[in-house]
Image: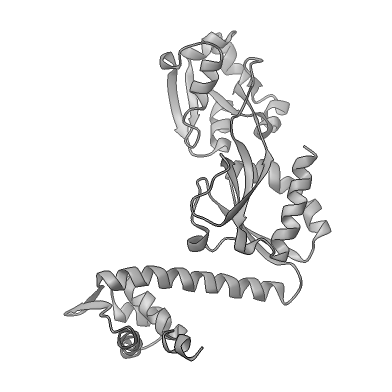
Amino acid sequence: MTSSRILLPGIPALQAFEAAARHGSFTRAAEELNLTQGAVSRQVALIEDLLGVALFERVRQRVSPTPAGAAYAEEVRDVLSRLSAATLNTMAGRGVVGGTLTLAVLPTFGTRWLIPRLPAFFREHPEVTIDFSTRIVPFDFGREGLDAAIHFGDPVWPGAGTKLHRLMGETIVPVASPEFLAREGVTNPADALRVPLLRQATRPTAWAEWIASLGLDPKWAKPGPSFEQFAMVAQAAAAGLGMAIVPRFLVEEEIAAGRLAVAFDRPIESRQAYWLVYPEARAERPALVAFREWLLGECGRG
């Protein structure tokens, strides 16, 4: 225990070092932390003395991290971020069993499927708070400081020590505005090859898979604009920019309102699925346990 303390710089010193590395300036770091420039310099010197490594190159009025300093700053930034998140979570929980769950969600899945169902969760678990972040691709839990994520794809996640639970699959359908279908004379699946096909950035092969399922050659398809989120794809289709290929459950509202129509009765089942994923080390956090059990129950009910 004594040895561990000797090798662990104090939090003020780490904050001063991280700010100086980020700004490339002791003066700007001092302004951010409401310290003097000399105080920041002394804190950094304490760490350098402890490590026996030069963390900055000092040239005139500027400082820049050495290779060792840059690598250390990245690690320190991650630790400080996670420590801050843990502190805020504990403060939010005020000692109550439950606390805060930090959850990364896919944007359209979150707005169209998850959030409308959350009132039921909070009625059952008023002791839990959920903080949402948007992510559309997998990430490093350690660096992001998040507790869990909703992931679409295969049952894999970068890095070791994660747990995945399958939530649901999805049915993919081609949709467009009724006006677009009438204007373009779209009446059979082969017509999809001659109209603009709207694309979702994280599903680059969706149209090719659907067209191939019809026995047609995807190379003759006419690519249209690409969008980052399904909500934008759906809006573009409703505006008449082209035809979209989307999970049906994400556009039920537009179909019911008549803003979109299923172009052809040729759905396909996606090869991938939605997953709840989280680090195994956080598996027993009360807020995550409550959310996991509720979410799996919701998905089991369809």
Counting labels gives 0
Along the line of sight, the residue nearer the viewer: 167 or 237: 167
Q: Give the x, y percent position of residue 36.
A: 35, 89
In the rendered image, is residue 234 in sight?
A: yes
In the rendered image, is residue 194 in sight?
A: no
Q: Quadrant of residue 162?
A: bottom right
Along the line of sight, the residue nearer the viewer: 133 or 235: 133
Name the residue located 38 percent from the left edge and 81 percent from the top edge.
16
In the rendered view, tell whether residue 147 sits above or below residue 212. below
Q: Is residue 44 left or right of residue 60?
A: right
Q: Is residue 5 left or right of residue 92?
A: left
In the rendered view, tell whether residue 24 sits above or below residue 201. below
Q: Give the x, y percent position of residue 164.
A: 62, 49
Q: Quadrant of residue 182?
A: top right
Q: Give the x, y percent position of residue 274.
A: 63, 41
Name the residue located 73 percent from the left edge and 56 percent from the top edge.
291
Outermost residue, left side? 60
Q: Quadrant of residue 131?
A: bottom right
Name the residue located 60 percent from the left edge and 17 percent from the top edge.
179
Outermost residue, right side? 124
Along the line of sight, the residue nearer the viewer: 144 or 230: 144
Colour mode of the rendering: one colour
Q: Give the x, y percent position of residue 47.
A: 35, 85
Q: Is residue 71 left or right of residue 102?
A: left
Name the residue located 41 percent from the left edge and 69 percent from the top edge.
75
Q: Is residue 53 left or right of residue 14?
A: left
Query: Quadrant where the C terminus lies?
Result: top right
